[in-house]
Image (cartoon, grey):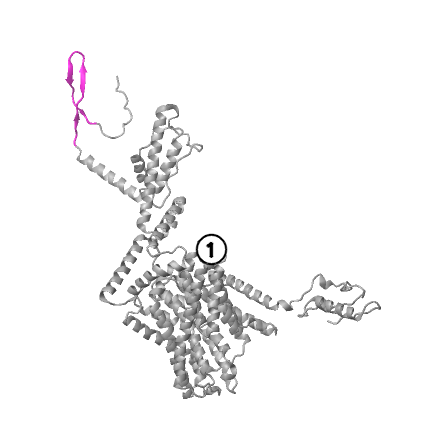
Amino acid sequence: MEVDVNVTDNFTTDDAEVFATTATTLFYNPLEESPWSEHNYFLENATTLNAFRPPYSLSLLAAWQPRHAVHYISVLLIITTILLLRVFNMVIRRLITTAVPESLVAICVGVGIGWLLKSLHSPHCCLWALTPTLFFMILLPFCVFDASYNLYNRAFGDCIGAIIVYALCATVLNMIIIGCLLVGAEIAGIFKAEGLVFGTQVLMLYASLIVAVDPVAVLMVFHEIGVDPNLYFLVLGESLLNDAVTVVLYKIVVNFLGRDDVTARDILIGIAAFFIINAGGILVGLVFGVISSLMTRIQTHLEIVYLFAANYAAYLLSDVLGWSGLVAMITSGMIQSSYAFHNLSDADKGTCRAMARMLADLCESVTFLLIGVHVTSGELHWHTSFILYQLIVCLVVRAVVVYALTWCLNRWDVNYVQISITEQFVLAYGGLRGAVALSLVYMVDPKLVDRGQRGVHATLTTATLFTILFTVALMGPTMKPLVRLLRVKLASKKTISLMRELNERMIDELNSGVEAVTGHMGRNRLRTWFQRVDEKYIRLVLQNTPEFRNQKIIKVYEDMALVLHQASLDPKRADLIMEELPTSVKAAYHAQRLADKVEALRQLRRSALRRGSRYPGVSMYDYQHMIDEKRRELMELTTPGGASPRLPRRNEPGGDRKVMKPLTITQTMEQARTRTTPPTQKLQQQLQHQHQAKGQDANRRPSLRFKRRKIDGEGEEAVKPQPRQSHQPPSAPSSPPPP
């Protein structure tokens, strides 16, 4: 900033330099975006330092200067678009169909936004781009947060063997087979029509990144329908570990990209790096999971911050060390959900899970939205033979590998239950591709891929986008009808039962004992050993109040007691509240409630009788209303599916009725049973009584009844017999005889 200084006779040069330095310090803005920099300031009085006074301008009142806030406005617009997208998706699900997944709707909206930005030639298109840094440093970690917390489940532990086989072996086999088929197709001359030469290294690179699956739509359908936990955790665990394995394979293949010769030593180093990268991620995750669990033992109001910061730190540190950040985050999240969550209060635990769920939903929607934006704004190149061939190869190879590995799992009983043929089809059909593959394509240096050609990198990007759109748009919406058509096994109804908990404990102990007797180290014996070590050492260190396995039975009893207490507080919604309780507990609750009502009615009747003996004039006037209310409640309990007839109250017509003696308990129950008799049953009873009455009249014989009359002075005298009177109503009196 240049300042003109008029120096007077009494104002030296040194004073002018000091003054100019002070003015520059006060009014200089390095960003040059302040409204002060748009005016020329001058010195009115050189003898004082208060000489600066900007000219009067309306820009001081209000000014539109969005240059320094463009990035933040773009982020706000993206979040607003996601919120509107949720509303739009809800309208579609309610008015049109529920088969369209939310990821497909987000991609379609992103295509529209990208076309609009491109047609307007907006300079801010780069702010809506899905860059590798944005995806791997912000979006992907928060998507994994919630999934890692949900893996702490008994079903996931039972399926861990099959999950590792699908995520590790299936991913490696898919990459090798797809890469070999692509290389063979290029050698056969299938890709010569476009005049591009890919090469073995480029095709293996593409095979390493296209095997990444992202079944968000499939998991949403599973959660909505409520499939068996075995199938749900197979798909969820495979998708999480598959992403980690894919990133590791990508790093290994990229290291070989650009080399003229690949020796056997390089291949062995790559195989060793595969295991070291995953093992290093597990180690980092263990360290940060233990640290976060120890930090939550200190009671503060920042426990949730500890958990999120530790998870993200594990991801960043593992990525900096060259190891798998996804594996580190998954390991840390599982340790936190196993140990650290027990140190939190119920409110903090619910808040942590809710925040993780919201962040995951937001990041997933942003990811698919930006994928749609890139469809119209990115640099693409269509290669018909390569794109269609790789799509068919990806789908067929995944199905073959899934069926082959599942046969091996069922043959050697690796999984705790047999995987049915319908579940195998769902696993093969649910291999949707997502943003992981697209981000890995962007991370590749185009110069290493093109090698002097033009369009190779753009062709790989186009093929990846086409595969994502095809799987999400075609396989995602058809997953829900297929699951219902194939009648996939659904989850059993969850109940709070002590008997179920005891049976599961007994079965686990029996299986562990059988394996110990036979000398076989199976999953049951290994689980029992780990539980003993966990309760004896680990939980005592990582938890304030360790929760042991035997306390789960007490926890189940507490849950049942809370449900019953809530049902007693709200009797009208008792059946809905006790939905998760066993049938025997519900029957016992209703029987106890009926017994309480009967006892209350009996006590009230006794009180009324005692008061009536003391005060005959007002014996039943004070208690009749209460007795009627108790009788009404008792009838409601004994009436199946209907309300009892309403008795008139005192202030209503018919309410001032004559005071009557209260009914006994037996009479009340009989009256309730009579009123609850169905109309058809009443009609049958009437017809049966009429039939019996006709039979009695037909078989009836005349009988004589003798009366004794007392004659004056003669004692008793037998009179002539009189016929027995019939039950017919008396007829009208006949006219007197004539005189």
Q: Mark 1: which amino acid?
A: Gln
Quadrant of the rendering where the N terminus is positioned: bottom right
- Please say whether residue 147 is visible from this viewpoint: no
Q: Which residue is mark 1?
A: 299
**Front residue of this view, candidates 91 and 469:** 469
Quadrant of the rendering where the C terminus is positioned: top left
Quadrant assignment, res 44: bottom right
Pinpoint residue 295: horizontal percent, then vertical percent: 46, 60
Q: Residues within 10 Å of mark 1 (few under 14, many from 20)?
A: few
Quadrant assignment, res 339: bottom left
Residue 721 lies in magenta, yes or no? yes
Residue 334 lies in magenta, yes or no? no
Q: Image check: 219 left or right of 66?
A: left
**Front residue of this view, candidates 657 and 588:** 588
Numbered disc 1: secondary structure = loop
Spot the residue most to the top.
713
Quadrant assignment, res 251: bottom left
- Please say whether residue 79 is visible from this viewpoint: yes
Spot the residue most to the right.
9
**Front residue of this view, candidates 180 and 92:** 180
Q: How many marks?
A: 1
Pinpoint residue 201: horizontal percent, then vertical percent: 44, 84
Pinpoint residue 458: horizontal percent, then vertical percent: 51, 81
Q: Image check: 79 left or right of 146?
A: right
**Front residue of this view, candidates 44 and 738:** 44
Which residues, given as a range, are shown in magenta?
701-724
Pinpoint residue 64: horizontal percent, then vertical percent: 67, 65
Q: Image check: 176 left or right of 310?
A: left
